[in-house]
Amino acid sequence: MNIAVCIKWVPVVARMKFDAETRRIVREGVPSEVNNWDIVAVQRATELRAEFGGTVTAITMGPPQARDGLARCIAQGADNAVHINDRALAGSDTLATSRVLAAALRREPYDLILLGNFSVDADTGQVGPEVAEMLGLPQITGASKLDAINPTTVRVERNLDDSVEILEVTLPAIVTVADGVAGDPFPGREALTAAKERDIPELTVADLGLTPADVGADGSPTWVEEIRIQETSREPLIIEEVPAADAAAQVVAILKERGILDPALRAPRELTPAPSAARPAVGKAIWVVAELGPGGPRPITHELLAGAQPVADAIDGHVAAFLMGPPGISGVVADLIAHGADSVLIAEDERVAEYSTDAYAATLSRAIERDQPYAVLLPSTSNGRDLAGRVAGRLSLGLTGDCVGLEVDAQGRLAQLKPAFGGNIVAPIYSKTLPNMATIRPGILEAFAPTAGRDGAVRQIDVPPTEQRVRRVDVRPVDVTDLADLDAAWAIIGVGMGVEADGMPELAPLRELLDARYVVTRDVADAGWMPRQLQVGLTGRSVAPNLYLGIALRGDFNHMVGLQRAGILVVVNNNRRASIFRGGVDVAVLADWHEFVPALTEALRAELG
């Protein structure tokens, strides 16, 4: 089994700095490393090679220093490495990057191509699907488990919002890997020294049969207009060197002073109703690709319908929901219109009864080519990212992943607001191609309350015949009651590694008192004692409770970025060097959580009655 692993050489995000005067990222003196998820992919590749034979080749596109990343992969067990290094590559966006990687991968007959599902500096999840489309290969994204049944077939487990999907695909294929696929062991010094002495071939743009017009800024359909530094407004009040009961009393006093304990805030937030009348389905259209769950449209679909309204107002256009599903799905149409869709385009067919990349990408791509909407918005979920990258690769469209907002400038261009480097900056990204295409993070935009009696147009969309190259073997529902109303939760308890699995019962009285929901850090999800679906942060979900209580967690940026819209953040840790004591939260308590949580529970009970 010959395996290629595409890796990315990224800056250590926690060490990045920003120059407030020049509004630029300061890279000088910032160390770099191989993207963590790519290291996991290399490890799993070497394990599969040990089982079935073959070779593992690491490939990167990057500056001269990226050679150190390839050496690290060789030290970890890769047999070969290829370095694509050319000044013409500077400024390449994901589509141009995918074009380069696809050209390099065509040079050898690989059975399996692996990529990390995300990169810590951009977090787009786009390159894997775009490369797969350019190579004409089937894809599976976000693998949490990857096994080979035999040398020609792999089986993958993939985490969705409320289930785990088990898929099989016949090789050759592309799989992007997420947390849990393998460990990320660090090779020893001797192995690293020997790897750095290896001859690693370099390829240029010309070697790949490409021209400068195919890569860099010229070959990229998206560009960054500016960088906006996201200065945190949270400076922690640090509570330390006092008994647990006193610390708890101080926290309750702060919550009371800020109005967080006001009973009115514990009621469900009142949402703005959708506009009473639908716009005519004429002129420029903003399409919202609907995603369905067991009970109908997922909350992110409603959020996108509301978030598209200001864009439609600015361009004198309208909002259309794009719905794919089995016969009988037309019952969802009324829900979409009530939540802000001016019209619904519906592909109602058994071939799209369940999500599949091939069928959904073929249907959406053909409709885009025919209708040429102004923008296409998709949820930044497992399936939304999977679909968006494939369609963008097929139509050579600019795609901005994981946006947190949309703006229309004075020239009528859509600025897609993209967070990067852990949310420390936001970059407005523009596209040279139409339609504009973006995925939006769940939990960032606020949905409308449904307005009864809205009447919108409905149009049928054909589903083209498509070969289903990825087979769904099974789907296992994840029974996580916290997921049901997490987006509307008044209080959320964040569980860090310091709690440990056997410590969860100690949190139960506080959870019950506040009617709170649990979320977890990536480390906790990796450990397997809380579901991956509850992970909050850079590669998880975003939440916006009035009150967030973080228990025994460090407060690293990759978790805190998912809490930007939370009301007040209170975190307890017994390590004074934890990130929470340096900023990003409202209250940081230096204490043993085993003592603090019971004291806080009693103090809150006395206050709330």
Image (cartoon, rainbow, N blue to C red):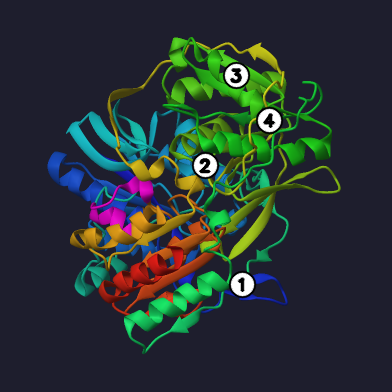
Q: Disc 2 versus disc 1: distance between alpha carbons?
A: 26 Å
Q: CA distance from mark 3 to mark 1?
A: 41 Å
Identify the residue under disc 3.
Answer: 333
Q: Is residue 573 positioned above or below 354 on the image?
A: below
> Which quadrant is the N terminus positioned in?
top left
What is the crowding at mark 1: few (fewer than 14 residues within 10 Å), some, or many (at least 20)? few
Precedes in sequence: disc 3 or disc 1? 1
Depth check, front residue: 267 or 108: 267
Task: Tell us which disc is closer to us: 2 or 1.
Answer: 1
Q: Earlier in the sequence, mark 4 or mark 1?
A: 1
Q: CA distance from mark 2 to mark 3?
A: 22 Å
Please give the label number shown on residue 380: 2
The residue carrying mark 4 is: 340
Magenta run includes residue 434 = no
Q: Indicate left or right for 387 with 22 as reference.
A: left
The residue beneath circle 1 is 233
Q: CA distance from mark 2 to mark 4?
A: 19 Å
The answer to whether residue 57 is left or right of residue 141 is left
Secondary structure mainly formed by the magenta segment: helix
Q: Earlier along the polypeptide chain: callout 2 or callout 3? A: 3
| Magenta region, residue range | 521-534
Instruction: Tell me the residue at 68%/28% (across/down).
Output: 451
What type is the residue that disc 2 sits on? Ser
